[in-house]
Image (cartoon, rainbow, N blue to C red):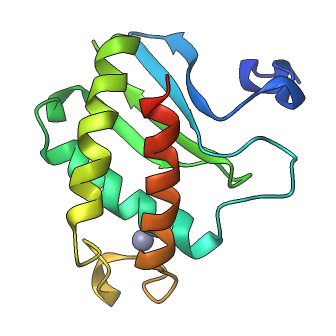
Amino acid sequence: MKKIPSFQKNHDLLQPGLYVSTEANGVTTFDLRFKKPNAGDYISPKALHTIEHLLATVLRNGAAAEKIVYFGPMGCRTGFYLLTVGLTFGETLRLLKESVPVALELDEIPGNRREECGNYLEHDLADAKRELRLYLGILNAL
Ligand SMILES: [Zn+2]
């Protein structure tokens, strides 16, 4: 089988930040890299799940809602993928700098009732916010 593009980049050289992962079929996939790969520090499964709920909700309710195709976690737990249409790198950076603080204001996890989520007990809002604050610092330094 063909090696897909995201497996072709050397993950040992990747630093936390924001990257364009792929551009295909009009969809730009951004790599929201929270953690340096293979460095022993990963987002906990609970925080990863909660950040998915928080940011997916905020992004789909924000000014660029109609340009968001998908937001979801990386299986390696070092970050997230954001799929967009018609957003440049600069626009996406600005969107995230605005959206993360909105997510940090939420006191409840959207969609965390049993009937709304596939693993509704696997959440940690405090740890999710700790990771989001760290990532906001990374974004603000870009
Ligand atoms: Zn869920």
Total numbered circles: 0
- Give x and y (percent) for residue 98: 23, 38
Q: Is residue 54 left or right of residue 134?
A: left
Query: Would you place residue 87 above or below residue 69 in this image?
Result: above
Query: Would you place residue 72 above or below residue 103 in this image?
Result: above
- From the viewer's side, name the closer residue of 124 and 132: 132
Which residue is rendered at x = 43% and y = 43% of the image? 136
Q: Is residue 19 left or right of residue 38?
A: left
Query: Would you place residue 45 above or below residue 41 in this image?
Result: below
In the rendered image, which quarter is residue 21 located in?
top right
Which residue is rendered at x = 49% and y = 28% of the image? 141
In the rendered image, which quarter is residue 15 located in?
top right
Displayed-image quarter of ligand 1: bottom left
In the rendered image, which quarter is residue 1 located in?
top right
- From the viewer's side, name the closer residue of 68 and 137: 137
- From the viewer's side, name the closer residue of 100 and 110: 100
Query: Would you place residue 135 above or below residue 27 in this image?
Result: below
Which residue is rendered at x = 49% and y = 65% of the image? 130
Which residue is rendered at x = 32% and y = 48% of the image? 100
- Give x and y (percent) for residue 53: 36, 63
Q: Is residue 90 left or right of residue 60?
A: right
- Give x and y (percent) for residue 77: 68, 55
- Give x and y (percent) for residue 126: 44, 77
